[in-house]
Image (tube, rainbow, N blue to C red):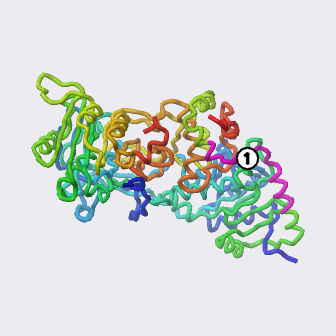
């Protein structure tokens, strides 16, 4: 199987000025962890609400007008379209401003950008999802997408970890997947607390213990860069080829459309050619820069 | 035998520019702001006709300004209202653009029209007429000829002018150029002697570019040195990360996007940015290019390795600005010519 061409460049037919944000309205806010929130949102414009479509893995540029703009993946599944979701950690100027907003607030949205996960290449495969921290956001869009089309895919393994029990995001999803008999779910934390009875250990180690088969499988990895870096060698040890590993990367993507320059890995722009890449695509290039 | 080309005396060129000013916003090389740049012509001063070489600020600034309003917005009871800034209706005519800088615009066109169209750049670009003037001298830092560019010839302009003494020979390169010539007054027919003088002028200009960049197998040589940290650390040691090389590079296009807000009114701007700055790639948890050598390497590779991979053209035109204007004499030709053959 080859997925090295998943970032083939497409011709986009964006209408009008691609930099102008659409106004979207925040409909619901969920506190995931002390620093992470999920926002449910919808377009203010009725027509866009109907027409907007996206793929799991794609991202948008969200802005608090007057403060600035930042990229986040769409964390909801395209199979569940009564609203859209994105999740973000409070770390900088824009994310802090977003965290100050309440239900009903208007924000700017541009997108969807990037290439999305190549679902056609995942069909009929065993899927191994490896996530860390808020890196579950793009994965959960894909996981729900897969679960909603369950007959198209084989086994589903999910290995998800966070620094501590309180840093686990999307706990309602974790619960649902734990209960789902068609999903093998492993949750781990780097460091437990007095109430934690689950696994303790870093995601790559737990992945090695879980040892999902590479046979007819694709691994989809997303998490902090350090986790991604240590996960690839483990997958290789388990027999996964670079073509069988997919990741979604994050960079400081300002424009989102391959113009502003800063998100490159070699000749690839994460915003334009990604954010979904196969390991085969990026392994040779500037090993320390992804 | 008359050639199909035209000519105009330098003395009358001001008249021609005045005529063009009826139709276009005419920009010419100017030092009015203290730095040589392409500025709106005042209708009088023609001293730039005696200039020999490119300006400090490249003409890319006429299409990708150092700072540009993208839109403005207001908030009221109904929510946000977003509006585009008023557009300048005048078409630009850039007089005196050099072949290196014209080629650079052709290179920028690729980025700004790839996949998504960049409306700010392209709307200015589509409406512009470029009138090139060949160089008659070169800086020590110029190396356009190593990149297949002649200092006095260009196919990236609409009209190309060659200094033939007291006159300019005028060649129409594009259809737009032909049309402009046909409706311009005061142009004389060029004769064979003019063509001969123009040829000699172009050849002389070519010979004046002496700096050489070794482009043989450059992509392979770079690829072989991608992880040669020792080399890039040595090369980057004296760099101050000031960003001048990128701001003044005619093919550098990186920009930042920022908002400003006063009361309920605000605007979004974009402004030149630079891979020389650590903050350029900074993310909350990580920065892939904290170390200076990675940033210096990025600039070199982007121009000579990555851009060619994407668009089949080197993102450097040998204009020499990054060498000439660097406060510590960092030299990209040296960095490339001295690439170790074996790592």
Question: As rendered, which of B330 and B314 lies closer to the eye?
Answer: B314
Which quadrant of the structure image shows residue A45?
Answer: bottom left
As displayed, is residue B215 above or below residue B193? above
Dot 1: few (<14), some (14–19), or many (≥20) neighbours within 10 Å? Answer: many
Which residues fall within the magenta stretch?
B199-221
The mark tally for this picture is 1
Q: Where residue A149 appears, x then y in whole percent? A: 19, 58
Question: As rendered, which of B3 and A66 lies closer to the eye?
Answer: B3
Q: Residue at x 42, y 49 (%)?
A: A255
Q: Where residue B278 appears, x then y in whole percent? A: 49, 33
Inspect this view and state whether residue B286 appears: yes
Q: With B156 as the anchor, is A28 left or right in this view?
A: left
Q: Quick one: SS at disc 1?
A: loop
Q: Where residue B249 appears, x then y in whole percent? A: 62, 45
Q: Residue at x 27, y 40 (%)?
A: A131
Inspect this view and state whether residue B339 appears: no
Q: Residue furthest bottom?
A: B1
Q: Tell me the residue that label 1 is attached to.
A: B143
Q: Where residue A51 appears, x then y in whole percent? A: 26, 65
Q: With A269 as the anchor, is B56 left or right in this view?
A: right
Q: Which quadrant is home to the C terminus of chain A?
A: top left
């Amino acid at each position: 199987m080859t997925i090295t061409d998943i970032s083939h460049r497409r011709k986009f037919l964006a209408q009008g000025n691609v930099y102008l944000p659409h106004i979207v309205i925040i409909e619901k806010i969920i506190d995931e962890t002390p620093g992470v929130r999920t926002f449910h949102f919808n377009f203010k414009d009725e027509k866009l609400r109907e027409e907007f479509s996206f793929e799991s893995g794609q991202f948008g540029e969200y802005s608090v007008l007057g403060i600035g703009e930042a990229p986040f993946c769409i964390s909801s599944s395209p199979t569940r379209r009564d609203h859209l979701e994105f999740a973000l950690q409070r770390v900088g100027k824009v994310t802090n401003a977003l965290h100050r907003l309440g239900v009903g607030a208007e924000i700017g949205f541009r997108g969807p950008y990037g290439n999305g996960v190549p679902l056609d290449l995942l069909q009929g495969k065993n899927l191994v999802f490896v996530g860390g921290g808020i890196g579950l956001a793009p994965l959960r869009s894909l996981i729900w997408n897969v679960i909603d089309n369950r007959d198209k895919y084989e086994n589903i393994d999910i290995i998800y970890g966070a620094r501590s029990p309180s840093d686990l995001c999307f706990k309602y999803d974790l619960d649902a997947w734990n209960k789902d008999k068609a999903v093998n779910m492993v949750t781990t934390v780097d460091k437990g607390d007095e109430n934690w009875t689950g696994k303790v250990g870093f995601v790559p180690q737990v992945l090695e213990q879980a040892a999902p088969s590479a046979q007819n499988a694709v691994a989809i990895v997303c998490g902090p860069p350090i986790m991604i870096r240590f996960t690839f060698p483990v997958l290789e040890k388990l027999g996964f080829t670079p073509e069988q590993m997919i990741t979604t990367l994050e960079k400081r993507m300002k424009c989102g459309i391959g113009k502003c320059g800063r998100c490159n890995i070699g000749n690839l722009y994460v915003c334009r050619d990604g954010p979904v890449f196969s390991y085969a695509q990026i392994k040779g290039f500037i090993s320390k820069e992804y | 035998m008359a050639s199909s080309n035209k000519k105009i005396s330098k003395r009358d060129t001001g008249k021609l520019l005045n005529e063009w000013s009826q139709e276009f916003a005419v920009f010419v090389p100017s030092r009015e702001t203290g730095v040589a740049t392409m500025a709106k012509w005042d209708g009088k001063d023609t001293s730039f006709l005696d200039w020999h070489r490119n300006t400090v600020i490249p003409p890319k600034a006429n299409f990708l300004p150092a700072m540009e309003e993208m839109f403005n917005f207001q908030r009221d009871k109904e929510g946000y209202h977003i509006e585009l800034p008023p557009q300048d209706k005048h078409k630009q005519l850039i007089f005196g653009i050099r072949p290196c800088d014209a080629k650079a615009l052709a290179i920028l066109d690729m980025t700004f029209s790839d996949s998504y169209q960049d409306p700010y750049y392209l709307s200015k670009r589509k409406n512009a007429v470029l009138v090139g003037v060949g160089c008659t001298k070169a800086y020590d830092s110029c190396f356009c000829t190593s990149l297949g560019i002649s200092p006095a010839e260009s196919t990236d302009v609409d009209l190309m002018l060659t200094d033939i003494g007291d006159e300019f020979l005028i060649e129409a390169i594009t259809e737009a150029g032909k049309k402009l010539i046909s409706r311009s007054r005061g142009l004389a027919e060029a004769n064979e002697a003019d063509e001969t003088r123009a040829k000699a002028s172009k050849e002389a200009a070519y010979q004046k570019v002496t700096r050489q960049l070794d482009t043989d197998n450059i992509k392979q040589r770079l690829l072989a040195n991608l992880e040669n940290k020792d080399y890039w650390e040595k090369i980057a040691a004296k760099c101050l990360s000031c960003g001048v090389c990128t701001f003044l590079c005619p093919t550098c296009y990186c920009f930042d996007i920022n908002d400003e807000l006063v009361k309920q009114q605000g605007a979004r701007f974009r402004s030149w940015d630079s891979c020389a700055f650590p903050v350029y790639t900074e993310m909350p948890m990580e920065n892939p290019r904290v170390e200076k050598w990675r940033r210096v390497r990025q600039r070199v590779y982007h121009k000579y390795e990555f851009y060619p991979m994407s668009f089949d053209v080197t993102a450097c035109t040998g204009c020499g600005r990054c060498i000439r204007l660097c406060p510590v004499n960092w030299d990209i030709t040296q960095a490339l010519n001295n690439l170790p053959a074996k790592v």
